[in-house]
Image (cartoon, helix red, strand yellow):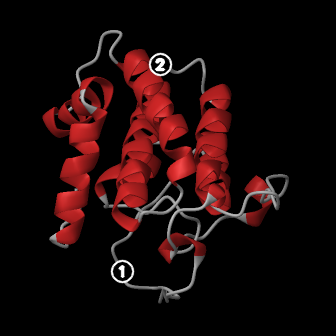
Amino acid sequence: MNAYFSGIIGSVNVACWGKIFKKESFKDILFDERLLIEEDAYFTFQCCMRASKIVCSNAPLYNYFQHPESVMNRTFDSINMQYFTVFDRELVECREDGDLCLRIKIRKLTTALDLISKIVRDDSGTEYLRELRQIALNTEDEIKLGNRLRFKIGLKCFLIRHMPSVFYGILRVKGSLGRNV
């Protein structure tokens, strides 16, 4: 699971492309066709939960093409809310492992904050802003029960809880300057 969650910092991508699986070990794990986003990450999560051994390599064995019109590259829409469906499923599957649940909650929180930034930057999906803010704040509350967040995430959570209009204003200014938050 360390390999799976190291994708948070970019060393291993959680998507299933770029991975090789032993078919006989995971033949009963299927992609959820109802998910239009994160279906591959959820598949990888289930495989990692079951795997007795995972080997990572830095060898360039796979070419990945990003299509400019893919779901991942579009402005925000309701499909993006499926991230939270996957996080909630992962939390159910690992509910007995506190460390794993904490890592999932941190991914859930950072995803909510990233999607808020995307909405404000692109001025799309504003009808989800309140729901995403609530997801971020509820998840932060769950995480804070004995854990400290990195300063930048903690600051974003403070602003979104106590001064959301200031936070959104900062996002708009940074977006107009072409900077990601």
Q: Quadrant of the C terminus?
A: bottom left
Kind of residue at badge 2: Gly
Q: Residues within 10 Å of mark 2 (few under 14, many from 20)?
A: few
Residue 109: x and y in percent read 41, 36
Q: Which residue is denoted by mark 1 in the rendering?
A: 59
The numbered mark at residue 18 is none
Q: Between residues 40 and 135, which one lies in front from this camera angle? A: 135
Mark 1 or 2: in front is 2
Q: Between residues 36 and 124, which one lies in front from this camera angle? A: 124
Residue 38 in sight: no
Q: Residue at x 45, y 85 (%)?
A: 61
Q: In the displayed structure, does residue 113 sit left or right of residue 67?
A: left
**Looking at the picture, does residue 127 appear above or below residue 99?**
below
CA gap, disc 1 to disc 2? 33 Å
When asked about the image quadrant of residue 89, the answer is top right
Q: Between residues 97 and 25, which one lies in front from this camera angle? A: 97
Q: Which residue is denoted by mark 2 in the rendering?
A: 98
Q: Residues within 10 Å of mark 1 (few under 14, many from 20)?
A: few
Q: Residue at x 50, y 31 (%)?
A: 135
